[in-house]
Image: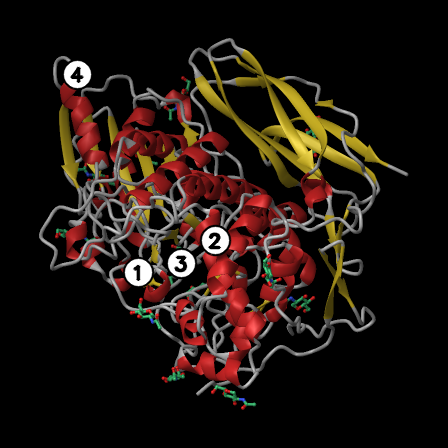
Amino acid sequence: MLKMRCPSNVSRAFLIVSSFFGIAIAQTEGQSEVPLYGQSPAVYPTPANNGSTSEDWAAAYAQAYSLIAQMTLEEKVNVTRGYPGTCVGNTGSVPRLGIEPLCLADAPDGIRGQEFVSAFPAGIHLAATFDRDLQHRYGHALGEEYRGKGINMALGPCAGPMGRVATGGRNWEALSNDPYLAGAAMSLITKGLQENGVIATLKHFLANEQEWRRRPNDLGEAVSSNVDDRTIHELYAWPFMNGLKAGAASVMSSYQRVNNSYASQNSKLLNGLLKTQFGFEGFVVSDWGGQYTGIASANAGLDLVMPDAGYWGGNLSDAVTNGTVSEERLNDMVARQLAAFYYLGQDDTYPPPSIYSSTQKHLPVNVQGDHRTLIREIGAAGTVLVKNVNNTLPLKNPQFLNIYGYDAQTSPSPWQNPSRYGGGYEVNFGWKTLNGTLITGGGSGGATPPYVISPFQAIQDRVISRTPPGNLRWDFYSENPTPAYVNAEACLVFINSYASESFDRVNLTDEFSDNLVNNVAANCSNTIVVVHSAGIRLVEAWIDNPNVTAVLFAGLPGQESGNSLAQILYGDVSPSGRLPYTIARQQSDYGSPEVVNGSVSLDYFPQSDFTEGLFIDYRHFDRAGIAPRFEFGFGLSYSTFEYGSSLYVTDALSSVDAYPSADVQIVQGGHPQLWDILFEVSIDITNTGSMSAHEVAQLYITVPGDETPVRQLRGFGRLLLKAGEKRTATFQLTRRDLSVWDVVAQQWRLPRGSYDIAVGASSRDLRANGTIQITQ
Ligand SMILES: *[C@@H]1O[C@H](CO)[C@@H](O)[C@H](O)[C@H]1NC(C)=O
Ligand SMILES: *[C@@H]1O[C@H](CO)[C@@H](O)[C@H](O)[C@H]1NC(C)=O
Ligand SMILES: *[C@@H]1O[C@H](CO)[C@@H](O)[C@H](O)[C@H]1NC(C)=O
Ligand SMILES: *[C@@H]1O[C@H](CO)[C@@H](O)[C@H](O)[C@H]1NC(C)=O
Ligand SMILES: *[C@@H]1O[C@H](CO)[C@@H](O)[C@H](O)[C@H]1NC(C)=O
Ligand SMILES: *[C@@H]1O[C@H](CO)[C@@H](O)[C@H](O)[C@H]1NC(C)=O
Ligand SMILES: *[C@@H]1O[C@H](CO)[C@@H](O)[C@H](O)[C@H]1NC(C)=O
Ligand SMILES: *[C@@H]1O[C@H](CO)[C@@H](O)[C@H](O)[C@H]1NC(C)=O
Ligand SMILES: *[C@@H]1O[C@H](CO)[C@@H](O)[C@H](O)[C@H]1NC(C)=O
Ligand SMILES: *[C@@H]1O[C@H](CO)[C@@H](O)[C@H](O)[C@H]1NC(C)=O
Ligand SMILES: *[C@@H]1O[C@H](CO)[C@@H](O)[C@H](O)[C@H]1NC(C)=O
Ligand SMILES: *[C@@H]1O[C@H](CO)[C@@H](O)[C@H](O)[C@H]1NC(C)=O
């Protein structure tokens, strides 16, 4: 039986898809009717695809349709659903035609629940590197592991949540609450994964910003993320556009509602934005158990349900037979999935799945390669130094160190729960088994490490390898360690902040850890704090303590955690990680209670109104004039850098017409002219210190107009500079980078006027300014 469990799309406007030159051009009608707040306009039908936007897709669709022509109704319906099997997700097969099940697996930072796979740094840690090359190599290495295991489809990368809610339980799986930074990484991870023939799955589409009531439960329906059209384009959907532009062949719908319509049956989101405006050629898969109706989801653009038949299976066959769902729609569901398979070349020598099962006795295939080297490099590159009084760091070959805090040592073995590993410790949940160093977060987004190098192990290796060997003292568990071992040259205190899928954090601090830092500092004038954190963690309880001499935000660094950290502590590598979010002085500085904790509504139909629009994180602090403790993009180095006083800006390199041209074929990623480079900005940067180091230069723009953020990140580059070396950082600004989403024209508009450009070492350490004039 097909059920309608929630109010469906409210029809206020409708969309006509017309075809000139074989081109899909979307036009909205009824512009005079402003959509009701928090209601999703109806957009039907789903555009039936034929791969017309590129030769590769066209060839893939031709192969798909030649199979579809031979398939029965039952066979077509079979491939739109999941079956239990060896993988996290298994599509239905068609044995008669040799169509095999696709194997789907988590997670964005490493294959979950398997042996001989790597635990990469989490997305939020990768974002903190501000390094495109590392982001690409990360995706590529991850893709080698997925392919090596014969997994057809990786359930990542993730840019939803964006991180609107400071305590959001899954923010760490994603990249950054800045859409430009998240978008760059979404694109490069997708590219890296798909270079191996693995299908990348952009998730969770869309506005999946909190865990509390993300799914229907005893209290009622799931929360509704009510987001206005401009904010959807300029913030939440932005990074998905990058992933699509990079060729992503799959997108996962989110659990919760958007504008009161479940994301898996929201026609405006799937048929409208994704499949029309962004020209998506691939298929939409539900989150696990995230389908809530049969007919409505099929017609709104869902293509594959997981992990079982959901509301489809035989019901979908009936609905096609009686015409409630058109056969064209069913064919399109199947075509999108089969075309993705051909697009990635999976018909050509893709290995069969080699997946762990508890009854299997032989050793599974080892896919780690030399990825640990890259993991260590990213671990170090994403570590952010935020305080370093009198050059406390790097350590100068110390012979006596004290180490405190449970986060210094290895957690219990992942074997205790191989598919749900998470280091760390969460005071409020009393999960004692999570007591240990935090390298990843919990839930389906967590990686399963083959081993974990704890900070204690790596520091101990360093202390005993000096001549003569040094001396360590440690206390992992006490909140008030005594005695103080007064001879130590430094006291290293390790604290962490755990987060997981399915619940949001209850706080941005915890008392145990804050007390530990202050207790150690009371007796140790050289206290170095290392914070492993699944997101924002406030530090006011001790940051100004004069005995706290250095502080590192060491993120979620993956399996090589201790080695990555030791490279920074001992100065093998100068820190260059930058905060991919703002650290406030107090939690209320982030804005309304909703952007701190998410909606905690107990209503049957809980509403979360994204009234702050574009103004989350630094955009909010800048607009409200609130001084953060550590601003977005901030991070210290062991070296010093001088920025040239002039910005060089090229003349316009492409058309600066207010709108992209009409009648141009939409390609995957949206209107192709959105990606045209309009200007290049460059600046010289010199390493004025005495060691080779990376500098992360950031470009921020102020778009003319009243409703635009004070500044927005629109360029970054991580440059390696030897002592004394000067290099030029160059930033390319695309049409989209300089545009706003015009809700009336339903198009990206390049405002006329003067754009302020600033380049610097963080969002508030701007070293050179310039302007771009767009007149006419
Ligand atoms: C959500 O609702 C707003 C009006 O509140 C509308 O402008 C926007 O297009 C809607 N988006 C979706 C995806 O429903
Ligand atoms: C797609 O193209 C194939 C062959 O070129 C054709 O048979 C099929 O009908 C087309 N399907 C759609 C949905 O346009
Ligand atoms: C549907 O898929 C399942 C699982 O792969 C398979 O066992 C079954 O034979 C398929 N049914 C048809 C009609 O091909
Ligand atoms: C139709 O969907 C309902 C709800 O999921 C399910 O219980 C039932 O088995 C389905 N019927 C068929 C024929 O698949
Ligand atoms: C068509 O079939 C579906 C699935 O069995 C059912 O829910 C729906 O009511 C039917 N519609 C009509 C018009 O018969
Ligand atoms: C840092 O150095 C200055 C100058 O040598 C000294 O006065 C100050 O006490 C030092 N601060 C710490 C925390 O060691
Ligand atoms: C961590 O585990 C150790 C050893 O089992 C235990 O003694 C300690 O109390 C735990 N710490 C916390 C904070 O739960
Ligand atoms: C540590 O400092 C506290 C507060 O100053 C003091 O009460 C305590 O005795 C000290 N402990 C040791 C072992 O020195
Ligand atoms: C959150 O942390 C603050 C600061 O440590 C504390 O005052 C507050 O009681 C905490 N709230 C909860 C619910 O733990
Ligand atoms: C700093 O450490 C010294 C011991 O080395 C202690 O005497 C002093 O009270 C500490 N200061 C603070 C603010 O804890
Ligand atoms: C967030 O929730 C916690 C726990 O319920 C509460 O202590 C805190 O005050 C809330 N913060 C805001 C800004 O509402
Ligand atoms: C650039 O402009 C910002 C304000 O947007 C200002 O804080 C900064 O000092 C300026 N820098 C230079 C080098 O002019």
Point out the quarter of the image occupied by ligand 10.
top left
Query: Crowding near pointer 4: few (<14 within 10 Å), some, many (20+)?
Result: few
Picture disc at residue 169? 3
Upstream in sequence: badge 4 or badge 2: 2
Question: How is the structure coloured here?
Answer: secondary structure
Upstream in sequence: badge 1 or badge 4: 1
Q: Position of residue 475 (x, y in %)?
A: 16, 40
Q: Of the residues shown, which amino acid type is indicated by label 2?
A: Ala
Q: Nearer the viewer, residue 69 or 35?
A: 69
Query: Crowding near pointer 2: few (<14 within 10 Å), some, many (20+)?
Result: many
Mark 4 beta carbon near ligand 6 (under 8 Å): no
Label 4 – label 2 distance at C-alpha: 54 Å
Residue 693 found in image quarter: top left
| Callout 1–callout 2 Cβ contact below 8 Å | no
Upstream in sequence: badge 1 or badge 2: 1
Is label 1 in a helix, a strand or a loop?
loop
The residue singled out by tag 1 in the image is: 88
Q: Which residue is found at the position 28% from the left and 33% from the top?
A: 372
The residue singled out by tag 2 in the image is: 340
Is label 4 in a helix, a strand or a loop?
loop
| Callout 3–callout 2 Cβ contact below 8 Å | no
User: Closer to the observer: label 4 or label 2?
Assistant: 2
Q: Of the residues shown, which amino acid type is indicated by label 1?
A: Val
Residue 28 found in image quarter: bottom right
Q: Which residue is found at the position 30% from the left and 22% from the top?
A: 570
User: Closer to the observer: label 4 or label 3?
Assistant: 3
Q: Nearer the viewer, residue 11 or 490?
A: 11
The residue singled out by tag 4 in the image is: 466
